[in-house]
Image (cartoon, helix red, strand yellow):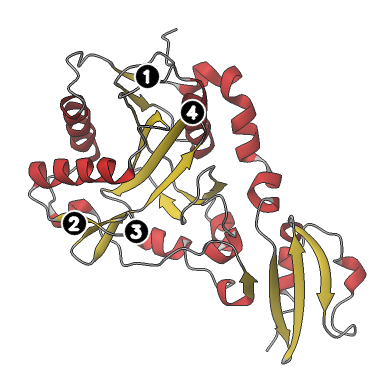
Amino acid sequence: MQSILRGGNRVLISKSTNVYTNLALERYLAENIKHQPKTRLLLLWRNQPCVVVGRYQNPFAESDIKYLAEKQIDLARRYSGGGTCYHDLGNLNVTIVTTREDYNRKKNLHWIVNTLNEAFNLTLHVTDRDDIFLDTFKVTGSASRLERLYAYHHFTLLINSCLNDLRRSLKSEDQIKITSKATPSVRSSVLNLADRNNSITYEKTIALLIEKFFQWNNEKNTTNCDYIDPLLYYEQMKDFENELKSQKFLYQATPPFVYTVEHEKQPIEISVSNGIITDIKGNDSIIDKKNFLGQLFHAVYHNIQKLNKT
């Protein structure tokens, strides 16, 4: 079994399309790789349809929980901050892992922009928020995790995603009902790269990034590139993957919030902390508080929706 933890300038492409497996792989590599100064690891991966919220976000405010369940679209919380993303097989995820000292988001983004612009005759640009736009359309968002010894910066590239599914999955009717200090996503109009240049494909983009990554890093050993099956490293990664799959991490890591429903014009305010309902303010004749207090909000979410009558 190949070593995926050796240092130097390397490219790894995940064979998995499972969001929990790929997020676990990313964290495992970042924590355990033999980091060397002035070198980078490029990890490329994509997922089956899923929604990924940032570490400090509220999944109810960022996505349509009911729709995701109906369509069997996975919902995950990642270890980095930033906003919510929709992933599918037409969306490439790019992770750049370095030492903490070598962490440089702007440099990473300008490399990807220059690479794509030159190869595909595009006019991509990096914004002050570290997003990548094509004219007025967003094609990638950006997020990072910084630790004492290492850092990783990851971002998406909309190549040929289903934008209707993206918009529908991220349309939350709960957003206006929630009061919270959780990080909100900044909504933008989006565009696939292939909509501007139909010669762009996932396969071409992968090949391009591999080639240009080694040139960018002045790396002569261009064979330092491997497709890997994360399942071969399940024992090493399982603690991360189990945490990512857990309801506790997905829902109970949500920052405190107040969820307000209206029953015949009478407001009911439900306070939630660590995913647990801690207080309810409203007419006792409308809501039987003892059935909700102390309960996990996500576990009684559908019952709460039944209270919402205009």
Task: Work out whether 87 lies above or below 265.
Answer: above
Q: Residues within 10 Å of mark 3 (few under 14, many from 20)?
A: few
Amino acid type for the residue under numbered disc 1? Gln
Q: Nearer the viewer, residue 286 or 134?
A: 134
Left or right: where 264 falls relative to 239? right
Q: Nearer the viewer, residue 15 or 98?
A: 98
Asked which quadrant contains residue 238, the reply is top right
Asked which quadrant contains residue 229, the reply is top left
Check disc 3 and report the residue beneath it: 129
What is the distance, in whole Å, between disc 1 and disc 3 at their CAs? 28 Å
What is the distance, in whole Å, between disc 4 and disc 3 at their CAs? 25 Å
Q: Quadrant of the C terminus?
A: bottom right
Check residue 149 in the rendering and tell me which mark sits there, or answer none.
4
| Nearest to N terminus: mark 4 or mark 3 | 3
Does dot 4 land on a helix, a strand or a loop? loop
Q: Position of residue 151 (x, y in %)?
A: 44, 34
Task: Work out whether 177 lies above or below 145.
Answer: below
